[in-house]
Image (cartoon, helix red, strand yellow):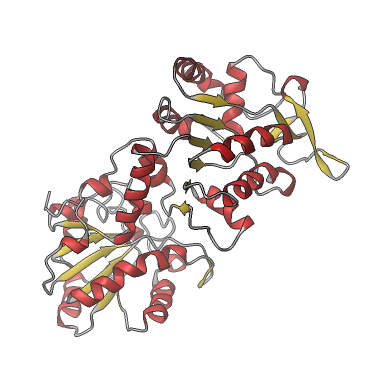
């Protein structure tokens, strides 16, 4: 990648792709972290370039115009942050010739396009739509790390027509994640949770022999334990992934990487019916399951094991909660891990929105040792060792 500081500082028109797909209630922004994360790049470009056209997607309009998914409220919020006027360009409700004329004749320096996913061609990486977008800039800058794993018109196709560069957020995300993957301070501990092996398969495989310890929890750990012959009552299990789980277990057995699976659990009767004893979730050990009981969290014995490993770690990667965090009685294990990481000075990457949410449950101020990635799926794929289309095109050239 080539970043924007490497671009000749001539006056030019810039198409800037950001990820402003933020949680909202009506027109109120509930979490502005992604917007704030893009400000350094926006301010840098404001100082150096003639005109900036910001573009992003928002929600899932599925190729149709939806007033509830307009970027206008986000434009309004950004105007307040930057204290400037941002002209709004709706390329979907108006003729393109009219929009281009308005843009090129305007003395304004900042613009924002309407929600890119109002056109289904955006997600199809349609060449015609890529060309339409490219005509708003002489260069393309991406700071949308959260969508860099998508091969869309605005994240990839546009670089068929104008050269692409990386913004500060993408540069920072890539450097931090790549550094802990390629040059970790050992022991490296990788904690992987979530419901399914199928979504974390490549991540797990990528750290066999790279990590000193892999800790598995959440629903995906159930499948591994079942592959080892354990009965887990009526817990969530991916039966079609049992063979793959066994193959991974065999690979781990031959590797230098130590695998940690839960020894005890907080259980419910079903996902909708908690199993509470003395105002706490019922706890049972791995060998105590009968025909009932559903795993919804790790237990205190497993927490103690993980605590020791975290204490001894020199770098940590955590992707996916180890329990059902939306349920108070079954978020305990994940909150425990978050608290242990916060109380260390160990360099840690937090990937995935649910994992980031667990950290926010413990503290509003993120400690300097913790990097909460803005990526979600992009972070997961980068940690899985994949080349992301939205990054490889940022080489300062037209493809």
Say if 325 sits above or below 47 in the image. above
Residue at coordinates 39% horizontally, 69% vertically from top-left? 71
Q: Is residue 84 left or right of residue 13?
A: right
Residue 215 appears in view: yes
Image quadrant assignment for residue 52: bottom left
Q: Is residue 307 left or right of residue 259?
A: right
Residue at the farthest right position? 278
Identify which residue, 193 or 114, lies in the foreground.
193
Q: Is residue 232 left or right of residue 53?
A: right
Exactly how many numbered labels are in the figure? 0
Residue 93 appears in view: no
Say if 51 sits above or below 236 in the image. below
Residue at coordinates 63% horizontally, 56% vertically from top-left? 361
Residue at coordinates 19% horizontally, 55% vertically from top-left? 158
Residue at coordinates 27% horizontally, 60% vertically from top-left? 167
> Where in the figure is residue 43, as x and y percent of width and height?
30, 73
Identify which residue, 192 or 195, lies in the foreground.
192
Say if 91 sits above or below 374 in the image. below
Q: Is residue 302 left or right of residue 60?
A: right
> Where in the figure is residue 92, as x and y percent of width and height?
29, 67
> Where in the figure is residue 333, as x and y percent of width and height?
67, 41
> Where in the figure is residue 178, as x and y percent of width and height?
33, 43
Identify which residue, 297 or 316, lies in the foreground.
316
């Amino acid at each position: 990648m080539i970043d924007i500081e490497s671009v000749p500082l001539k006056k030019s028109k810039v198409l800037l792709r950001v990820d402003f797909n933020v949680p909202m209630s009506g027109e109120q922004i509930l979490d502005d972290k992604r917007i704030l994360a893009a400000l350094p790049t926006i301010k840098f470009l404001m100082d150096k370039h003639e005109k900036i056209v910001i573009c992003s997607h928002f929600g899932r309009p599925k190729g149709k115009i939806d007033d509830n998914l307009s970027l206008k409220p986000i434009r309004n919020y950004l105007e307040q942050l930057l204290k400037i006027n941002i002209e709004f360009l709706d390329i979907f409700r108006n003729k393109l010739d009219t929009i281009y004329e308005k843009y090129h004749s305007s003395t304004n320096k900042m613009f924002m396009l309407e929600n890119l996913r109002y056109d289904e061609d955006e997600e199809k990486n349609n060449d015609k739509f890529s060309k339409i977008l490219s005509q708003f800039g002489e260069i393309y800058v991406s700071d949308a790390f959260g969508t860099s794993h998508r091969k869309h018109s605005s994240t990839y196709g546009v670089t068929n027509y104008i050269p692409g560069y990386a913004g500060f957020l993408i540069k920072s995300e890539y450097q931090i994640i790549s550094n802990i993957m390629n040059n970790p301070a050992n022991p490296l501990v990788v904690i992987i949770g979530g419901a399914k092996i199928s979504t974390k398969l490549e991540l797990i495989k990528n750290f066999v022999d790279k990590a000193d310890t892999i800790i598995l929890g959440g629903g995906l750990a159930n499948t591994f334990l079942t592959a080892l012959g354990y009965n887990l009552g009526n817990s969530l299990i991916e039966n079609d992934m049992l063979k793959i789980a066994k193959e991974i277990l065999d690979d781990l057995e031959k590797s230098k990487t130590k695998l940690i699976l839960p020894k005890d659990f907080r259980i419910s009767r079903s996902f909708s019916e908690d199993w509470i004893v003395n105002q706490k979730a019922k706890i049972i050990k791995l060998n105590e399951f009968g025909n009932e009981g559903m795993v919804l969290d790790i237990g205190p014995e497993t927490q103690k094991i993980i605590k020791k490993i975290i204490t001894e770690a020199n770098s940590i990667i955590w992707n996916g909660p180890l329990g059902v965090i939306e349920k108070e009685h079954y978020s305990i294990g994940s909150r425990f891990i978050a608290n242990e990481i916060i109380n260390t000075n160990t360099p840690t990457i937090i990937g995935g929105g649910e994992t980031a949410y667990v950290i926010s449950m413990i503290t509003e101020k993120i400690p300097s040792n913790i990097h909460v990635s803005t990526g979600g799926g992009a972070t997961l794929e980068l940690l899985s060792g994949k080349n992301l289309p939205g990054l490889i095109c940022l080489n300062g050239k037209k493809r």
